[in-house]
Amino acid sequence: MTALIRIREAGFKVTPYGDAFDLSPSSLLTQQQREFLKTHKSEILCELKREQLIVTCYAPAGVAFEIDALNEEHALWLIKMNPGPKEVLH
């Protein structure tokens, strides 16, 4: 199990923030979890960076699919152009 998966399975949302990451709800972190994060910071950042290049997009019917972005700029463009599923009216 990777460090990122482990902290997410503990109930935390991890968001990349430049050369760091934000964790919420940070008020619930134990001292042991804080030490784990310090020890595995570089691993978590690498995993987050890899995730950023896989973008979930949505077909017009709302079906999700993943696209491997070519680079960070392409990933941001994909996210901007495809913000999320739209409610399908029948």
Image (spheres, rainbow, N blue to C red):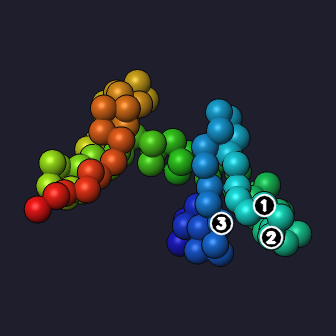
Q: Label 3, secondary structure: give it.
A: loop
Q: Position of residue 17 (x, y in %)?
A: 65, 38
Residue at 44% x, 48% y is 51
Q: CA distance from mark 3 to mark 1?
A: 8 Å
Q: Which residue is mark 1?
A: 26
Q: How many numbered marks does the figure carry? A: 3
Q: Amino acid at mark 1?
A: Ser
Residue 82, visible in the rendered structure = yes
Q: Are marks 3 and 1 in contact (CB under 8 Å)?
A: yes
Q: Secondary structure at mark 1?
A: helix
Q: Residues within 10 Å of mark 1 (few under 14, many from 20)?
A: few
The vertical placement of 35 against 77, above or below, is below
| Circles 3, 2 touching at the beta carbon (< 8 Å) | yes
Q: Residues within 10 Å of mark 2 (few under 14, many from 20)?
A: few
* Residue 3 is at least partly visible in this image: no
Using the image as rendered, state which of residue 6 and residue 65 is in the foreground.
Answer: 65
The C terminus lies in which quarter of the figure? bottom left
Marks 1 and 2: in contact by CB < 8 Å?
yes
Residue found at x 37% / y 37%: 79
Q: Nearer the viewer, residue 50 or 83?
A: 83
Residue extending farthest to the top is: 73
